[in-house]
Image (cartoon, rainbow, N blue to C red):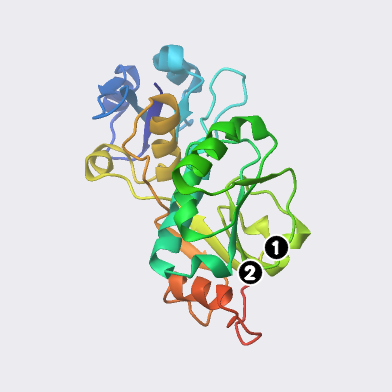
Amino acid sequence: MFVVLNIERYSKKVSKRKSKKINRSPPIICHTERGLPFYLLNVCEEKRGIDWKKTSERCGRYVSRIVAPRNILMPDDGCLRRFIPSTFVSLLVFNSAVQLLKSAEIDPKIFTITLSDRNAFLAGEVCRLLPFSSQVRIITSHPERYAFACTKALEEYGATLIIRSAYELSSKPDFVISCDGAYNPLMESQAVISAKRSCGGALRFIGKSTELTDSHKKIISPSVEPTDFAGALTELCACSEYSGAVFSDIDISCKKCEAENKNCLKCYIEGRFESSHKPINS
């Protein structure tokens, strides 16, 4: 469980009395369809700013699990802590890559897929990649966590997952799914999807944010980053509502095929990615 801060900034419309009432009110419990509930805490930012001591007290036991607008500076006092999702961002990258592969409809025999997942967050998802390429490679620091996936791949698909500790070039065009954002100079000539611009790649797909459900849009302030909220629900409330979430926006480095991400990936894999494709800067 966690607390979402709904910040109401000071204005002439907010009287001192109303401001005090808001800052004294307890957090509102919000139930989810498939997981634990979360709390919504209304906070009024007064002339002197936000009373973080009082806010901390109102958050109670979830003071170290705060989802707040990213433009709000929270005090570094060791008590209040902003929650930043980790595994959820990796899942967004993975789901978006699968969606891209489905729409591109590329011959599985002509390219490889490399999943960069050093923390092994996606061991339970990796077999979803097997229908798209005849060779799936995994870069991880925890190969033991992929043992079950390797067995499943062999028994259900007749495929062998290739486990590596570092990125290696492939003899075929390679689509790198950089779920951990790790960079390797050898990736500079490949197609890469990631949440970080620093991942490199001759062709880059950089994902941004995600879309909240209509019910959540009604109660969560637009100033709260959707990825932070959906990530908190997934990681802290065991909620499955966003298990299939993808990026709501993807920047593509190639400007020749910018209207269709799937066309650009297909173009790269099939060897039609030429110097005339002018990539944007990192």
Residue 202, position in %: x, y? Answer: 66, 70
Residue located 54% across and 63% down the image: 205
Locate the N terminus and report the quarter of the image it occupies: top left
Q: Mark 1 touching mark 2, by CB under 8 A? A: yes
Q: Secondary structure at mark 2?
A: loop
**Amino acid bearing label 1:** Ser
Q: Residues within 10 Å of mark 2 (few under 14, many from 20)?
A: some
Examine the rendering and report whether any part of residue 254 can be seen: no
x and y, in percent, of residue 21 in the image: 28, 21
Count every numbered label the image shows and give the total. 2
- Give the image quarter of residue 187: bottom right
The residue type indicated by label 2 comes to: Pro
**Residue drawn at (75%, 47%) of the image:** 166
Residue lying furthest right: 185
Q: Residue at x 62, y 81 (%)?
A: 278
* Residue 26 lies in quadrant: top left
Q: Tag 1's secondary structure?
A: loop
Q: Position of residue 81 (x, y in %)?
A: 54, 25
Depicted 226 relative to depicted 273: above or below: above
Q: Quadrant of the C terminus?
A: bottom right
Q: How much space separates mark 1 and mark 2, taking CA atoms?
A: 7 Å
Is 70 situated left or right of 238 in this image?
right
Q: Which residue is mark 1?
A: 170
The residue indicated by pointer 2 is 173
Q: Is residue 185 above or below residue 236?
A: below
Residue displayed at 62% across by 87% down: 276
Residue 189 appears in view = yes
In the depicted structure, whether residue 258 falls above or below residue 198: below
